[in-house]
Image: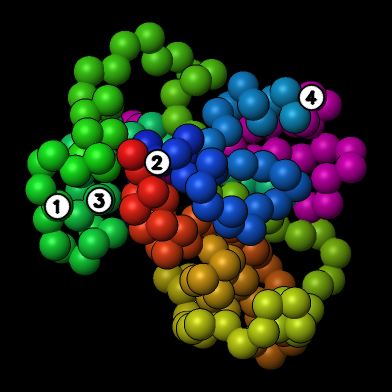
Amino acid sequence: MKNLIVALGIVLTSVAHAETFQGIQFDWKLADIKAAFPNSKIEFPHPAWEQKNERLLHMTGKGISGTIVILLRHADYNSCIKSVDNLYEGKSLPPDTALKRLCDIYRNQKGVTPENAGTVDYIRWIPDPDINIESYYQKFGKPDTVYFDEDMTKTADWKRKGIAVGYLEYSGLVGYVTYTQSKQEVKNAITNLK
């Protein structure tokens, strides 16, 4: 889910355990990705929708099946507060909550470089081999929802696991798998903030 704030990444990974791909963690920065995959080829396509606080990267290389697409997002104070409010479905939190204090950290950031700006917002794997959607049904059970995304790709979404799988309806072949932090994991992490 794109509206989750990356500002929580560091806190969340110590509390919540979302499904991830290839060991990539949601609190990782670009430097962490480069360190974990030193022989990979990383490209920055700069799609038209990319915002100034985002960096999209494509990663390929020997030992990587298909392409790994990662969105790094740098949270500022306003996007942090907006995401918190969205997470709680429009119910604003009092200004003294731990989460809003966490957002205050982002109010006056300094020393942000391309290597440390932003943490993983989502991971998308675009597989090369033929993988059928049935493999995901067998592993995770019935999805929470099935819908057509903005590109009219049928998508099975296991929200409680943070996994959405886009596939061709007529063949069942998987086109992409997106890994995100689930809404419940974010809420659990917020509850556990001291």
Of labels 4 and 1, the one closer to you: 1
Q: From this view, report whether residue 22 is shown above or below residue 107.
A: below
Report how far apart the C-alphas of labels 1 and 2 lie in the structure: 16 Å
Circle 4: element type: loop
Q: In this picture, which residue range is highlighted in magenta?
A: 37-66
Identify the residue position indicated by label 3 in the image.
Answer: 84
Give amino acid for label 4.
Pro
Marking on residue 93? 1
Give amino acid for label 3.
Val
Of labels 2 and 4, the one closer to you: 2
Q: Position of residue 109 (x, y in %)?
A: 29, 17
Residue 101 shown left or right of residue 1 in the figure: left
Please give the name of the residue rendered at 58% of the width and 37% of the height, measured from the top-left corner: 57
Report how far apart the C-alphas of labels 3 and 1 lie in the structure: 8 Å
Report how far apart the C-alphas of labels 3 and 2 lie in the structure: 10 Å
Residue reaching furthest to the front: 194
Please give the name of the residue rendered at 83% of the width and 26% of the height, measured from the top-left corner: 39
Please give the name of the residue rendered at 13% of the width and 62% of the height, measured from the top-left corner: 91
Please name whichever residue, 108 or 150, is drawn nearer the observer in this view of the structure: 108
Identify the residue position indicated by label 4 in the image.
Answer: 38
Report how far apart the C-alphas of labels 3 and 4 lie in the structure: 35 Å
Q: Pick whichever of labels 3 and 1 is earlier in the sequence.
A: 3
CB under 8 Å between callouts 3 and 4?
Answer: no
Circle 3: element type: helix
